Image (spheres, coloured by chain):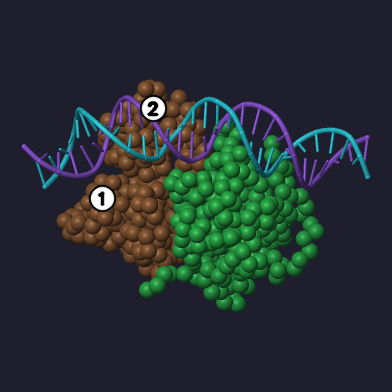
Chain colours: A brown, B green, C purple, D cyan
Amino acid sequence: MGGSREPSHKTGMNSPNSFDTGVLVRRLSSYSPLSGADVAALKRADRSPVGYSRQDDIIRPGDAPPLLFIESGWALRYLPMTDGDQQVVQVLLPGDIVDRAAFLPGARTITAVKCATDIRACALCPRAMHEAVSERPNVARALWLGVMLDENRLLEHVARLGRRSSAEALAHLLLELRHLHKRIGAMEGETLTVPLAQPDIGDLLGITPVHVSRTISSLRHAGLIEMDRPTLRFLDVKRMSLFCGFDPAYLEAGPGPA
Amino acid sequence: MGGSREPSHKTGMNSPNSFDTGVLVRRLSSYSPLSGADVAALKRADRSPVGYSRQDDIIRPGDAPPLLFIESGWALRYLPMTDGDQQVVQVLLPGDIVDRAAFLPGARTITAVKCATDIRACALCPRAMHEAVSERPNVARALWLGVMLDENRLLEHVARLGRRSSAEALAHLLLELRHLHKRIGAMEGETLTVPLAQPDIGDLLGITPVHVSRTISSLRHAGLIEMDRPTLRFLDVKRMSLFCGFDPAYLEAGPGPA
DNA sequence: CGGAACATTGATGGATATCAATCTGAGTGG
DNA sequence: CCACTCAGATTGATATCCATCAATGTTCCG
């Protein structure tokens, strides 16, 4: 039954706190500019980092989830189905909050989160976060913008599943990942490291692993990508975007043009 | 294309404000108990109600959406696709906020919202709402719980589209609507009024209108429902829930058992 | 070295799309 | 009030996409 639920090592994370909060602060200030006092308030919420191993479940349905954000690695948030299948609803990347239900004391989550890679996560003190939110409008605004952007990604995911062929859906998903990494300088040219296995991608797109293989193959033959796990290379972003109707507007933080 | 964007009549809504806020207050206090002062703070945000006609678009992608909630009628929140198709992402019922991007000054929405029936909507003063949120913890908590419950519905919608057959997806959707109405006493026994046309349901489930007809037909023949627009009757809720794996936990507000 | 998860490819079946025809009911203009 | 039109609903025939079953190869890890 899936991986262990225990963190693999609670110690051994010897990077200083100033670096631990770095990922979250960088993310939030990309949403809304933060002052020194805003950053200080966030640092006050910082707790010790925790490590998880690939395949570990960080949370499960029914849990009162801990207030955690991803510091390094990829995780998948999913709904376990009654027949044993899984539907992935969100790819969690560094800077993402694992489950925002943690902001609500006593709330339970309906999702599970499993690690696609080894993960470093960082806990936040709920009390200190609530203080930061109520006393620091910039922090509140940035967190709320994060909520809206995550909702946008979820809405586009619905559209992928409902209204796109498997090839279009895969192309759209990969372009989303490309856009997110491009913006934080996490790509080398058009090359991106995607640690997901084909069964993971199947759980994301609602198709079988066998068909994932065929779908990747069709994008390859169309000259759109090269993919040799874990390396993904985009060969023709413009044509690929046109092919699947990808428009990055839903990933943009700021208010649009007046 | 599509309906007018203008409210059909800005006047003629002659019910008193005390009733207008009623729907929202009732919804929020079902999430978290509200004191008299909480309710008063909400009433201070209340503005004049607005009417829309069936097929009108309330908002469109790119808009800075107004802060509105539905007072009566059903609306559909959807993403317009490049090929002209639509993917409905949310059914908006009385008490639902049309688009929470409105809480973020200057933010743009990526969705459109169209009226499935004639609609009475009610505007809220953003300034007064921000006051209520920052000064009234109960209000903030209730609004945040609403965000989480809407996210849960969206997550289950993803699972419907990704991991269920059309018959299972339809059964699951109808049971969700049943549960939401049952709880507010908006059903007569097992009979529910669903004003959606079959093409609307197709846009919800990501299938063609033709196949919606066949799918309804199969649920009918299975003895699960009677459906004669706009009347829907549930004949065997237990078997139907089992059939599609419906578990209402994701619609429950409160924290689970300790 | 052995095993397990992953990846690829082929053959076949089932679910849904597409195309087409008919029927109904509601709104509209004469 | 009636004829007309149009959106919606239903049913049939055919095509396409993806699932399923099966076999094989590969990589990684113990």
Q: Residue furthest bottom?
A: B36
Q: Nearer the viewer, residue A47 or B72?
A: B72
How many other residues sit within 10 Å of disc 2, few (<14), some (14-19) or many (≥20)? some
In what quadrant of the picture does the C terminus of chain B appear? bottom left
- Give the percent coordinates (x, y) of residue A206: 41, 42
Q: Relative to B141, is B84 above or below?
A: above
The answer for which chain carries disc 1 is: A
**Gap between marks 1 and 2 measured at Cα:** 28 Å
Front residue of C3/A195: it is: C3
Chain letter of the residue beneath label 2 in the structure image: A
Q: Quadrant of residue D25?
A: top left
Helix, strand or loop for disc 1: loop
Q: Amino acid at mark 2?
A: Leu
Residue nearer the viewer, C10 or B79: C10
Is residue B204 at least partly visible in the picture? no
Count of numbered marks: 2
Q: Which residue type carries mark 1? A: Gln
How would you rate the neighbour count of disc 1 (Cα within 10 Å): few for under 14, some for 14-19, many for 20 or more?
some
Instruction: Residue A9: tell me if it is visible.
Output: yes
Q: Which residue is mark 2?
A: A219
Residue D5: image x %, image y %? 80, 33
| Residue B198 sits in quarter | top right
List x then y, in percent, for residue A100: 41, 58
Q: What element does badge 2 sit on?
A: helix
Checking the image for residue A55, the label placed there is 1
Residue A29's place in the image compared with A129, above or below, is above
